[in-house]
Amino acid sequence: MSDHSHTQADIAARIGAPPGRGILRDAVYGAIDGAVTTFAIVAGVAGAGLSPFIIIALGVANVLADGFSMAAANYSGTKAEFDDMRRLRSIEESHISRFPEGELLEVREILEQKGLSGDVLDQAALQITSNRENWIALMMEGEYGLSSIDPHPVKSAATTFIAFLLAGIVPLFPFILGLNNAFTISAVMTMLTFLVIGALKSHWSLSPWWRSALETLLIGGAAAMIAYYVGTLFHA
């Protein structure tokens, strides 16, 4: 974990423009699901003893259709979150205009629960409520537990789709290239993909890379084994 600068200028710049949620969640979500669902199709179809052409056709269809579906779903979910934040912000703006005394009491309660008291509490409450934007931001965080930074539906959707596409195409490579023992190679490549995703994810975690990698491998491997077992039930 790298340290950041604590000079006054750097602190002001960093606190003044926080990065927000970022794309980590969307990238990990899309990549794991892309690898899992595509290999699940590969494993299921291979378990049923069908031809490599069918594996490629169904796999590509999954990467494109399911990837787009996930991206659209993530867009809709993030947009709903964004719309809800705008709705709550509108409520707070209305309350501040119509019930300023009551909203001031709420500010005092929020600050008091953060440990302020006495004259410091009085001065802080008055200072915050003297700036409407700061007032609203405090209410969004203190009353609703929401960040003042808006989510980005398009960025979330695009990240999910790209991650899904990159990881989801991996299990298909051995079949596209017509390699011998394509299924075995696909299984190994997919498991390595899970390990890589988990190891990269550990960069933003307190867990060691090998633990994060093994955790992701177990999740993806379990889904793959279930799909392969189901596929064998339909083997001619």
Image: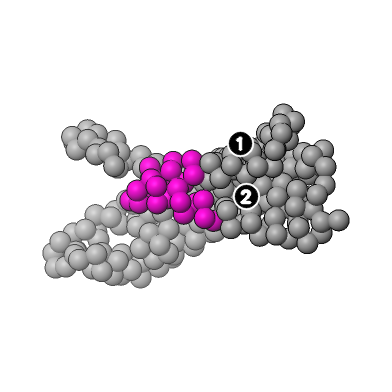
Give the residue furthest to the front.
180
Whether residue 97 is in magenta: the answer is: no
Q: What is the distance, in whole Å, between disc 2 and disc 1 at their CAs?
A: 12 Å
The span picked out in magenta is 195-219
Crowd class of label 2 (few under 14; some 14 to 19; many from 20; radius 10 Å): many
Above or below residue 120? Residue 148 is above
Q: Using the rendered image of the protein, determine whether residue 118 is visible from the camera's viewpoint.
A: yes
Residue 113 x, y percent position in the rendering: 25, 69
Whether residue 205 is in magenta: the answer is: yes
Q: Residue at point 40% right, 62% down?
A: 145
Residue 179 x, y percent position in the rendering: 71, 31
Nearer to the camera, 234 or 159: 234
Q: Residue at point 35% right, 48% down?
A: 208
Type of the residue with mark 2 = Val
- The quadrant of the rendering that contains the C terminus is bottom right
Q: Using the rendered image of the protein, determine whether residue 148 is visible from the camera's viewpoint.
A: no
Query: Could you tell me what secondary structure mostly forms the magenta stretch?
Result: helix
Question: Do tag 2 and tag 1 residues touch (Cβ < 8 Å)?
Answer: no
Type of the residue with mark 1 = Leu
**Circle 1 SS class:** helix
Q: Which residue is mark 2?
A: 36
Q: On the picture, is 163 further left or further right than 181?
A: left
Which numbered disc, 2 or 1, marks the residue that appears first in the sequence? 2
Give the residue furthest to the top.
177
Above or below residue 98? Residue 211 is above
Q: Quadrant of residue 11?
A: top left
Q: Which residue is mark 1?
A: 166
Residue 142 x, y percent position in the rendering: 35, 63
Q: On the picture, is 98 further left or further right than 229?
A: left
